[in-house]
């Protein structure tokens, strides 16, 4: 049993040391590429359908505002009459001949038009503010999804390293078991640990693919297409 305990101590020490190395190497902070992140944000702003909806609302509100400003001319109504020079109107004699222009003002529209224009302007300003708010929201969302994807990648690297360590330990214990230097129980525990590590790796890979899909959903394109 002394030989077994020594062997287990060496394996556990080796496993702990390599696991710490893997853990140190799996920090995703060095992986953060801020220029690339800016490209992701720009891609999301360009392709995400909700952005097109917001821009459409801004364009619609701007068109209404411009139309309201031009509609000041609706207050005035122009008309003309033509009085031939050689005609005589005995009932309503006139001293003017030829074309005569007249302009009338709609008093109701004259007083309500400023309020209509102001309302259209406020609607346009609200649409701009909502668009700006959503731009900030989508930027923050892309950052969260990007960081989550990098963290998921780091987790996969960690689990992959743990599987490699587990395979090494299982191989060493198998060799020791075949030489009767350890018990089947110890060897079986190593196999069970290796099985569990493989399961954790599969879960980490699923989480990474899910994080990638979430990021691509808001980008509107595959991640590999963003250069």
Image (cartoon, rainbow, N blue to C red):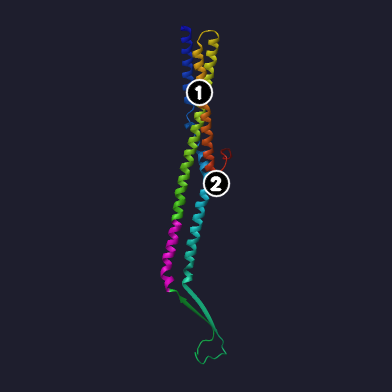
Magenta stretch encompasses residue 62:
no
Magenta stretch encompasses residue 118:
yes
The crowding category of the residue bearing disc 1, from other C-alpha atoms within 10 Å (few below 14, some 14 to 19, many at least 20), is some
Q: Are circles 2 and 1 on residues that touch, CB within 8 Å? A: no
Q: Could you tell me residue 40's position as x and y percent?
A: 52, 41
Mark 2 residue element: helix
Q: At x 44% / y 64%, what residue is drawn?
A: 117
Disc 2 vs disc 1: which is toward the camera?
A: 1
In this figure, what is the number of numbered marks? 2
Q: At x 42% / y 68%, what residue is drawn?
A: 112
Q: Is residue 149 above or below residue 60?
A: above
| Residue at the disc numbered 1 | 196
Mark 1 residue element: helix
Where are the magenta residues, as a range?
A: 107-125
Q: Is residue 133 above or below residue 222?
A: below
Q: At x 50% / y 76%, what residue is drawn?
A: 78
| Residue at the disc numbered 2 | 47
Q: At x 50% / y 23%, what residue is drawn?
A: 196
In the rendered image, the quadrant that contains the C terminus is: top right
């Amino acid at each position: 049993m002394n030989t077994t305990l020594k062997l287990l101590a060496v394996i556990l020490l080796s496993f702990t040391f390599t696991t710490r190395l893997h853990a140190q190497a799996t920090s995703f902070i060095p992986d953060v590429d801020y220029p690339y992140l800016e490209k992701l944000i720009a891609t999301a702003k360009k392709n995400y359908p909700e952005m097109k909806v917001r821009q459409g609302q801004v364009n619609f509100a701007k068109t209404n505002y411009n139309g309201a400003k031009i509609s000041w001319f609706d207050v005035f109504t122009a008309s003309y009459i033509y009085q031939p020079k050689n005609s005589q109107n005995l009932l309503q004699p006139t001293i003017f001949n030829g074309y005569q222009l007249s302009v009338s003002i709609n008093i109701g529209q004259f007083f309500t038009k400023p309020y209509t224009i102001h309302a259209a302007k406020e609607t346009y300003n609200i649409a701009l503010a909502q668009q700006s708010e959503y731009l900030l929201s989508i930027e923050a969302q892309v950052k969260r999804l990007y960081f989550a994807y990098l963290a998921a990648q780091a987790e996969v690297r960690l689990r992959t390293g743990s599987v490699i360590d587990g395979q090494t330990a299982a191989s060493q214990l198998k060799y020791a078991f075949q030489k009767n230097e350890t018990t089947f129980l110890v060897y079986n525990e190593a196999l069970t640990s290796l099985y569990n590590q493989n399961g954790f790796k599969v879960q980490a890979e699923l989480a990474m693919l899910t994080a990638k899909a979430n990021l691509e959903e808001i980008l509107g394109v595959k991640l590999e297409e963003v250069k």
